[in-house]
Amino acid sequence: MEMRKIVSFGNSSYVVTLPKAWVTKNGLRKGDTLTIDERPYELVLSARGEGKKKRSETTINCEGKTLRELKTELIAAYVNNSNIITLKGANIKDLSATIKPIIYGLVGVEVIEETSSSIVVKDLLEISEVSIDDIVRRMDLLVKSMLEDSTHRDKIESVQERDKEVNRLALLAARLFRAATDNPGILKTFNTNYWDLLMARHITVQLEHEGDYVKRVAKLLNTNNSRKNSGEESRRIYSQLAARYKEAMKVYYSKDKPASYKMESDTKRFMQECDKVIEKNRDATTVRVIENLKQMTKSIMYILRTVMEHE
């Protein structure tokens, strides 16, 4: 954190100098205009975009790295809003078939160049045109459809594909949140503030978790090793949880605090219902199903708490 002194300027103004690094990073120069957002005990200065946007580039060395390591670096560069991502290495030709599905799994990017030693990925997305509220609603619809289809054996593959889409949207939300922290002007575009954006980002994390748990439960409920009686008990609790999830998202959209308190206070009772199923049926499949349902319940609780903390 840098400190700046207030300097008197004339009879009615005061002057504070700007850090040179910040001016350079935002492509600003003498005569450009800044917007000032006045808040309690602080002023937020934002570049309005008159300066030339600085292009961000990331180069990833692929040699000697596993696919998992490369995926982690690629996603990190994506979330950090790199405009150009270049993957380099003598082993690119061998990696191409496995790394491309990861690239195409990211919203708004495209391979623009490929050689025997490099793959160049370009960002084609205008982040200011992305709506965090739309992302939340799209993720929510996907999770709801997954819940509805997850008990049908013939729809398991479709459930898994929708989980991938939920994950793609979660990464897009993370990217948007990072962009907003770097450029407060994006908040003005969305007519929101950091707190509400942070809460929406928190919701996308919980929705991503819900999608993962639904995918796992779908596979477990449709396994041939699941006993008939325990399967019926698991499905009964699962049906109740699906209803709880839908109600929690309804509460989230309406920002109904009294309803959020009521639902949150009922969480302990539902957890006890889950434990009773395990007490009656201790086979491995049932235990794994119920443990995933309990984790889903926790995510629902966190969703409700964003409503409780809403101003």
Image (cartoon, rainbow, N blue to C red):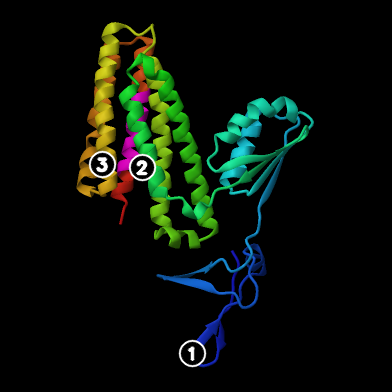
Residue indicated by mark 1: 12
Evaluate if marks 1 and 2 touch, with contact meaning CB atoms under 8 Å apart. Answer: no
- Per the rendered image, the range of residues in magenta is 292-304
Give whichever of 94, 22 is nearer the camera: 94
Determine crowd level at label 3: few under 14, some 14-19, many 20+ residues with C-alpha closer than 10 A. Answer: some
Q: Left or right: where does residue 129 sit relative to residue 26?
A: left
Mark 3 or 2: the one toward you: 2
Q: Measure how far apart labels 3 and 2 are at the Cα level.
A: 11 Å
Give whichever of 206, 278 is nearer the camera: 206
Q: Measuring 42% from the left and 23% from the top, which residue is drawn there?
A: 158
Q: Does 120 appear in magenta?
A: no
Q: Measure how far apart labels 1 and 3 are at the Cα level.
A: 51 Å
Instruction: Identify the mark at residue 250; answer none if there is no mark.
Output: 3
Q: Measuring 20% from the left and 47% from the top, which residue is drawn there?
A: 258
Residue 114 image point, x, y percent: 72, 36
Is 214 above or below relative to 285? below
Residue indicated by mark 2: 137
Badge 2 amino acid = Arg
Q: Measuring 34% from the left and 29% from the top, which residue is drawn there?
A: 145
Determine crowd level at label 2: few under 14, some 14-19, many 20+ residues with C-alpha closer than 10 A. Answer: some
Is 24 above or below relative to 134? below
